[in-house]
Image (tube, helix red, strand yellow):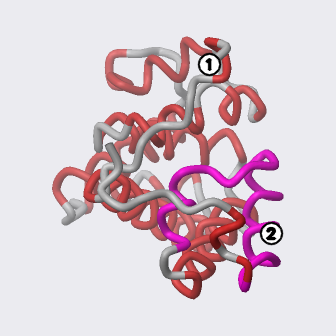
Amino acid sequence: MARVPFLNPEDLPDHGDLVERIAGRRRGSLINVYRTLLHSPPLAESWFDHINRIRWGSELSGRLREIVIIRLGHLTSSAYVLRQHVPKLAADEGMTQAECDALADWENSDLFDCGEGAVLAYVDAMARDIVVPDAVFAPLKYHLTDRQIVELTLMIGAYISHSRVLQALEVDLEPDESAGV
């Protein structure tokens, strides 16, 4: 159960434009993370703008973004992140369910190319160890531009933060739409 009560759009009459903007980018509904964060509208707006800039203002491909986000969902045990991205958002970027599942143990999978493997090793190092060894960082230079490396690094950091906030506040999952709930 969430540690902070969820807000509904009617609870935020002075922030209707923000609520509409957030819902519009989130498949038309105000998802639980924002129903929580909107207790602080300025920070909810900052969070929303930052996460969307990282996702949509980046030179990284949609597939690579989803690979990173889903891997971080596995590493941080974030059921919320996984539910938001698998299968719908991942499928929208051309990923299969098998690929999404394989991200839990990507090193034992042949579903990811060399560049994706370099990115996944980087994700793991940032999430698990914080300090990234040169041997993990160097392969990125063969597959990504400097801009893409910076964008990737910011995205990983943002989604690690995202998962930590969701877990600390125990933000409940939305009902599973595929189960008819």
Q: Which residue has dot 1 on it?
A: 181
Tell me the tag on residue 1: none
Q: Where's the N terminus, which quadrant?
A: top left
Name the residue: 62% across, 50% down: 31
Q: In this view, does 64 lie above or below 110?
A: below
Q: In this view, does 31 lie above or below 41?
A: above
- Overall secondary structure of the magenta stretch? helix
Q: Position of residue 147 (x, y in %)?
A: 62, 73
Percent position of residue 7, x then y:
55, 62
Tell me the kind of residue under disc 1.
Val
In magenta segment, residue 64 = no
Q: Which residue is drawn at 33% across and 16% down?
A: 108
In the rendered structure, which amino acid carries the disc numbered 2? Answer: Arg
Q: Quadrant of residue 58?
A: bottom right
The residues colored magenta run 14-38
How far apart are the alpha carbons under marks 2 and 1? Answer: 25 Å
- Horizontal side, residue 119 vs residue 61: left or right: left
**Residue 49 x, y percent position in the rendering:** 66, 76
* In this view, the mark in front (2 or 1): 1
- Who's the residue at 42% across and 42% down the image? 172
- Please indicate, yes or no, whether residue 132 appears anywhere in the rendered image: yes
Residue 28 lies in the magenta-colored region:
yes
Residue bearing mark 2: 21
| Left or right of 178, for residue 155 | left
